[in-house]
Amino acid sequence: MGLVKLRIREFAAKEGWSLKEVSDRSGVPYSTIKTYALSDGMAMADVTALFKLARAFNILVEDLVEIVKE
């Protein structure tokens, strides 16, 4: 099974946002943002959260996801 890493910290830094600001702007709970942002690789992620994050950063979901292991 593949693992993915979400590029939340990268996009937050580009915008000058803290993880708390990412949570506020996206509507995704801070605990979820923190878990996703600090993970080196996840097998699953909430698709709704991914769409909300992509919308907050004004990017495609595909830009947010990095495959780290297939």
Image (cartoon, rainbow, N blue to C red):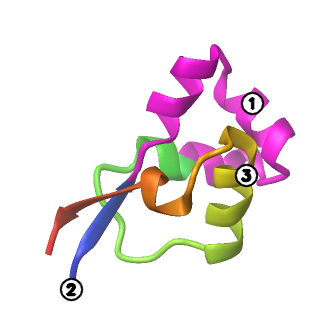
Q: Are marks 2 and 1 in contact (CB under 8 Å)?
A: no
Mark 3 or 1: the one toward you:
3
Q: Which residue is mark 1?
A: 20
Crowding at mark 3 (Cα within 10 Å: few <14, some 14-19, many 20+) = some
The kind of residue on which mark 1 rests is Lys
x, y percent for residue 14: 53, 20
Residue under the image location 61 percent in, 63 percent down: 50
Q: Which mark is residue 1?
A: 2
Mark 3 or 2: the one toward you:
3
The quadrant of the image that shows the N terminus is bottom left
Q: Which residue is mark 3?
A: 55
In primary-sequence order, the first of circles 3 and 1 is 1
21 lies left or right of 66: right
15 lies left or right of 9: right
Query: Secondary structure beneath disc 3?
Result: helix
The kind of residue on which mark 2 rests is Met
Q: Are marks 3 and 2 in contact (CB under 8 Å)?
A: no
The kind of residue on which mark 3 rests is Arg
In this rendered view, identify the residue nearer to me: 42 or 60.
60
Crowding at mark 1 (Cα within 10 Å: few <14, some 14-19, many 20+) = some
Q: Which mark is residue 31?
A: none
Query: Secondary structure beneath disc 1?
Result: helix
